[in-house]
Amino acid sequence: MQFACRCGHVIKDQTDGLPYKGWVTRDKHEALMAAASKRIEDFLQATLAGTRHAWVAAHFGEDYARAVTPDEAVIFDLLSTAMDPVRLPLYSCDQCGRLWLRSHNRLLSYLPEDGERGVLDVGPDVPK
Ligand SMILES: [Zn+2]
């Protein structure tokens, strides 16, 4: 996806790890994280019991289960899926500093009063 900021700068979201993209997490994520933790535990138990393929197919579909998917990727997808209902993507404009929050398929803009720029960029010290 891409969109034009009010200043004219084009903001693109076509890859991971963008320095101008972040997430806003709603304050109702604890129950979802607990449910995701339980699903991860169920996945690990199914793996130990030798029923991994059936468990993965039941949760992600047969095509996903047929792919050689490492456990790390399955756990990542379980966590990501669990967080989708409570997180909203947030973008900052490199040119004017405006923040754009996407909620219910609408883009809402917020302009910092002090001219701050790059508030979502965590810098080079984040583990990859
Ligand atoms: Zn802008």
Image: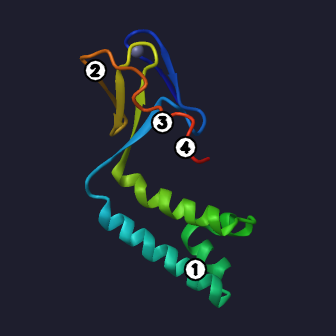
Q: Spatial distance from mark 1 to mark 4, Cα to Cα? A: 28 Å
Q: Quadrant of residue 89?
A: top left
- Distance from Cα at disc 1 to Cα at disc 3: 32 Å
| Label 3 CA crowd tier, 10 Å (few <14, some 14–19, many 20+) | few
Looking at the image, the residue that sits furthest to the front is 125
Secondary structure at badge 3 equals loop
Q: Which amino acid does label 3 sit on?
A: Val
Residue occupying the point 58% across, 39% down: 16
Q: From the image, tell me which residue sits under label 4.
A: 126
Q: Does the residue labelled 1 lie within 8 Å of ligand 1?
A: no
Q: Which of marks 1 and 3 is in front?
A: 3
Q: Is mark 1 on a helix, strand or loop?
A: helix
Q: Which of marks 1 and 3 is nearer the N terminus?
A: 1
Are dots 1 and 3 in contact, CB under 8 Å? no
Quarter of the image where one finds residue 72: bottom right
Residue at mark 3:
122
Q: How crowded is mark 2: few (under 14 residues within 10 Å), some or many (20 or more)?
A: few
Q: How far apart, in angstroms, are the residues tagged by discs 2 and 4?
A: 25 Å
Q: Which residue, as the protein is rendered here, is positioned at the far bottom? A: 49
Q: How far apart are marks 2 and 3 (CA)?
A: 18 Å
Between tags 2 and 1, which lies in front?
2
Residue at 57 percent of width and 74 percent of height: 58
* Amino acid type, label 4: Val
Residue at the spot x=41%, y=56% of the render? 83
For marks 2 and 1 on the same chain, the one whose residue lies earlier in the sequence: 1
What's the CA distance linking mark 2 and mark 1? 45 Å
Q: Which of marks 1 and 4 is nearer the N terminus?
A: 1
Report if the CB atoms under discs 3 and 4 are less than 8 Å apart: yes
The kind of secondary structure element at disc 4 is loop
- Classed neighbour count for the residue bearing mark 1: other residues with Cα under 10 Å, few (<14), some (14–19), many (≥20): some
Q: Say which residue label 2 marks.
A: 112
